[in-house]
Image (spheres, rainbow, N blue to C red):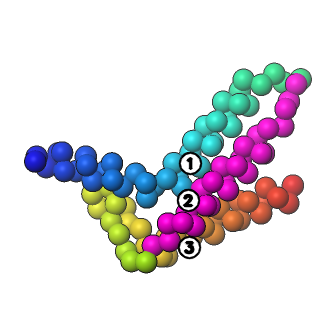
Amino acid sequence: METREIISQQNLESLHYALPALLLALTACVILIQDLTEEPHRRSGASPFLAMFGLVAAGLCLFFRVPVQTKEIFAGMAVLDPFSWFFEMFFIVVAFLAWASE
């Protein structure tokens, strides 16, 4: 196999480790599109619930992916370890609490 094929295969294998961040980015895009397509005088108020859904989905993905050891992903461009997991979970919980306090 060529080096390019090996790196591309490693990147595809690494995608499931980045699923929580991808879910949050996708949720943000959906909220932006939903807000842009909504008529100004007929606000549905769906954005906060879409945000909550994205936070819960990302939190669950993160919860079931607790790293026990350090792992390099995306051909060494990023690292997963318990410290980064803690901060990802911390920021998702803080965002959820900010949403719940409104």
Q: Is residue 3 magenta?
A: no
**Disc 1 versus disc 3: distance between alpha carbons?**
18 Å
The residue wearing badge 1 is 23
Question: Residue visible at 27% across and 57% down?
Answer: 75
Q: Does the CB distance between marks 1 and 3 fall below 8 Å? A: no
- Front: mark 2 or 3: 2
Q: Residues within 10 Å of mark 2 (few under 14, many from 20)?
A: some
Rendered image quadrant of residue 18: bottom left
Question: Residue visible at 18% across and 45% down?
Answer: 5
As shown in the figure, which amino acid type bears the numbered disc 1? Answer: Leu
Residue 69 position (above or below residue 99): below
Of the 4 image quadrants, the one containing the C terminus is: bottom right
Q: Main secondary structure of the magenta part?
A: helix
Residue 80 position (above or below residue 21): below
Does 75 sit left or right of 79 as displayed?
Answer: left
Bounds of the magenta segment? 42-67
The residue wearing badge 3 is 86
The residue wearing badge 2 is 61
Q: Nearer the viewer, residue 91 or 69?
A: 69
Q: In the rendered picture of this protein, how many numbered marks are placed on residues? A: 3
Residue 2 position (above or below residue 63): above
| Label of residue 13 in the image | none
Q: Does the CB distance between marks 2 and 1 fall below 8 Å? A: yes
Give the mark, 1 or 3, whose residue is nearer the N terminus: 1
Q: Where is residue 45 drawn, in percent x and y? A: 84, 37
Q: Where is residue 57 drawn, in percent x and y? A: 63, 54
